[in-house]
Image (spheres, coloured by chain):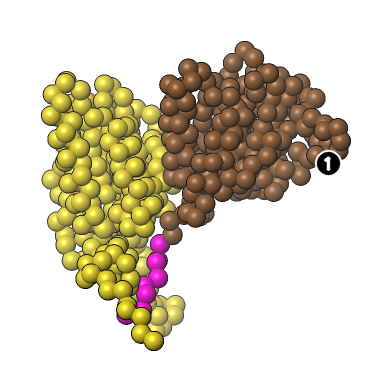
Amino acid sequence: MTKQQANWSPYDNNGGSCVAIAGADYCVIAADTRMSTGYNILTRDYSKICKLADKCVMASSGFQADVRALQKQLAARHLIYQHQHNKQMSCPAMAQLLSNTLYYKRFFPYYSFNVLGGLDNEGKGCVFTYDAVGSYEKVGYSSQGSGSTLIMPFLDNQLKSPSPLLLPAQDAVTPLVEAEAIDLVKTVFASASERDIYTVNKLELVIINAAGIRREYMELRKD
Amino acid sequence: MNFMASKQPENSLLGPESDSQRTLYPYVTGTSVVALKYKDGILMAADMGGSYGSTLRYKSVERMKPIGKHSLLGASGEISDFQEILRYLDELILYDNMWDDGNSLGPKEVHNYLTRVMYNRRNKFNPLWNSLVLGGVKNGQKYLGTVSMIGVNFEDNHVATGFGNHLARPILRQEWHENLSFENGVRLLEKCMRVLLYRDRSAVNKLQIAKITEDGVTISQPYSLKTYWEFSAFENPAQGAIGSW
């Protein structure tokens, strides 16, 4: 008997884009709020951003069920860490945990494209960017998801990041102030929503600084 | 050279026979479920058809069931998988009741449980071939969510499965608003179900509408929608093109 081929796929792409920008004493993480499948819209008001720790926030796009499972995994591991160490996980620690969690499923991956943003132990902004199987890098800014091909070149142009090959190593964290960075993120999404059908509806921004975490929203074109 | 071939026991899950143990495609299926939030709770509608491929085999299938005190589950897709899910939920609610602590699982909890079940079956490459709609009210909070067969889940003010996503959701996006009255909610659902009846070949004209409020679940008796087939554009459809249909 010939082997039956599967006629369903365990993966789906629910679309959307995420961006994170790190500053001297703040970090901005943003994502759109549409969930789609193929050419259909499932819902217009779905958050892709998840707070993992006090100073650490993750935005993920891709296959929503995998993203949800990943967020739950990390939240559970963070809780255990808090019980064992009596403190919150730092952003770099969470970054490593996320990488390991993703690689653990190297041969049946989480179809999840993540950016992790937050403040490190000195209160400086940090952004980590990932692929679906866990390779990651600390950067000054990043974007992932369906609109990343439109957004990333624009961020490269505006944020003029120094080459990582320079010696002594130069910081990739942007010299922009918080308000300027937020403005840049809003501009970037407004442009991406013109051309990417999956990055639309509403923009959700999370800003972390010494004072804490706050959330902002901005309407985008809805078509 | 003859190596001793390793002998699989007959009911092993390795080898070609293992595929027949896993869901490959659905057999008896239900079509769309449509649901919306209204002033007092959730309204949900589903027809009573169970199709066996292109045959309308069963015409009295109840595709909506109450779950516990606070929730209502509607399902489209494989009917036998829906019955399996009802067995899982039965056990879940039973164990919850056995605690006898005055607490009961609300719709959010049941939805989360269903999401985990669907996602875990998908991980094992043996999915429950359903799209589920879970609605309910607990302590005045209305909740309406959906889960697909691969675990994609979300909640919204109105949801639909299958063809309902294509035909009913646009109507709901246009005409739904907060605090719909019961009559207007039913009218809106019937409008969606009528469109589905005209355009979805697996729909049958025998539907139930279910209501869940803080006071509990009511599932209506089956009834049919009035349809109109006298549109002049459909009279003598082959008029302009003899031989077509």
Judging from the image, what is the letter of the chain drawn in brown? A
In the image, what residue type sits under mark 1? Leu
- Residue at horizontal 49%, vertical 49%? A105
Q: Is residue A47 left or right of residue B47?
A: right
As drawn, A123 above or below B33? above
Q: Residue at x 13, y 24 (%)?
A: B100
Image quadrant where residue B111 sits: top left
State the extent of the magenta-drawn residues as a range.
A1-8
Looking at the image, residue B97 lies above or below residue B44? above
Q: Residues within 10 Å of mark 1 (few under 14, many from 20)?
A: few
Q: Chain of mark 1?
A: A
The image shows residue A206, relative to residue A8, as above or below, that is above
Report whether A163 appears left or right of B212: right
Quadrant position of the C terminus of chain B in the picture: bottom left
Between A64 and B186, the residue placed more toward the observer is: A64
Identify the colour of chain B in the image. yellow
Residue linked to disc 1: A165
Question: Is residue B213 within the magenta segment?
Answer: no
Q: Nearer the viewer, residue A158 or B50?
A: A158
User: Percent from the top left, x then y, of residue B81?
Assistant: 24, 55
